[in-house]
Every structure is written in structure tokens, then in C-alpha cells.
Image (cartoon, rainbow, N blue to C red):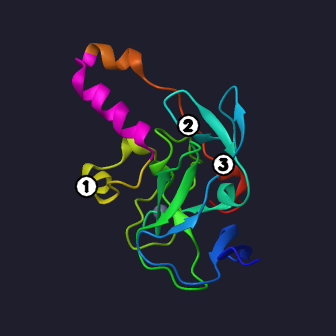
Amino acid sequence: MDDGFELRGTHQKGEGVFATRAFEIDETVMVGVIDRELDRNHAHASQVSAERFVLHGGLVSKVNHSCEPNCGIRLNASGAHDFVARAPIAAGDEITFDYAMRNYSVDYFPARCRCGSRRCRGRITGWRDLPAQRKADYHGLVAPYLLEIDQTRTARPPAQTAAANPPVGRVAWWCRSAL
Ligand SMILES: [Zn+2]
């Protein structure tokens, strides 16, 4: 069966997930399924709330980061992350999202981001470090808990926000050879 995407090797970034047909804006490209809950964060974890980490099944965990992604995240009824097109996707395009749409903070390798987009911000950062304009660009297509953290932090005086830092969300950059 053709799901509309498949895993392929790339020259620059190791494996990636590529569209095998066109998708329109706002169309669900990949349906997220939670494989299992994790009792703590680890390399392949997806952060789905301030304190909850899961492992997504299928190819969702293989989708690469881009600073100019063609997909965003939408929470589905199962609590998993669907990838939804935020730009038209043609057959053969790599499916990408911004790790900052999912992880509040990111432990990144000292190497620079190699997404190659015109809007590359140089390194892969989490939501915490995303410029306000970029947050606005991603409106509606990020994990909802990120917005809740922002609201909580702006509602609290600075002395308390330092103590209320949520757990760090790691991304699996070390699983992707060139990131
Ligand atoms: Zn980049």
C-alpha cells in the first residue's frame, strides 16, 4: 500500500522521509502513532507534554529537521503527533518539520544545522530559543504544550520561572549522520 511517503537515503543527511505523492496545505501527511510511553527522555523520544515523552512508531521518528519545514505538528486523538502540510508538497519532496515544534529545548551537537534552507538559523534549537516571529509563523502547527509553557512563564515573575524550567527534550540528532 502506498502511504504517500517512504524512507530514502540522502547524500547530505543520512536517511529521510520523502513524499511519494503531492499533498496540499493543511493535509495530514503522516499520522502519528505512539509506540510506547517512556519513563524518561532519551534519544528517540518525542516530547508530548512538559513532562511526558513517548516513542512514535513507524517513520515519524525518521523525519528530519528543517528550519524552513513543509510540515507542522498537530496533536491527534490518541495524543500522538500528526505531520500536517504547511506548504504544498510535491512527490519526491523530503518531508520535514522543525524540531522546535515538538521539543521545548534541544541538546544540539556543536556542528551547525545542515538543513540547507534559506531561512536556516544556523543551529537546531528548541521552542524556548525560537524567535517570536518564527513562533508566529508556526502558529497552530506546534505541540500545544509548548504554548502552555510560554503562557505559564510569562504569567510568573522571573524569580519563579527559573525554578520552573521543564525537562529538556532531546532530539535524535545523533542518529542522523550529518546533522
Ligand atoms: Zn537549518
Image coordinates of residue 164 in percent, x first then y, are: 40, 18
* C-alpha separation, residue under disc 2 versus residue under disc 1: 22 Å
Q: Nearer the viewer, residue 153 or 124?
A: 153
Q: Earlier in the sequence, mark 1 or mark 3?
A: 1
**Residue 2 located left or right of residue 50:** right
Res 165 visible: yes
Q: Return the x and y of residue 88 as percentages of the image width and height.
A: 43, 79
Q: Is residue 110 left or right of residue 70?
A: right
Q: Can you tell me whether the CB of the residue at mark 2 lies under 8 Å from the nearest atom of ligand 1?
A: no
Whole-percent x, y for residue 27 in the image: 47, 70
Nearest the camera: 107 or 72? 72
Secondary structure of the residue carrying tag 1 is helix
- Secondary structure of the residue carrying tag 2 is loop
Residues in magenta, as a range: 143-158
- Provide the secondary structure element on which disc 3 rests: loop
Q: Name the residue that disc number 2 marks.
A: 169
User: Which quadrant of the structure image shows residue 7?
Assistant: bottom right
The residue that mark 3 highlights is: 172
Magenta-drawn stretch, dominant element (helix, strand or loop) = helix
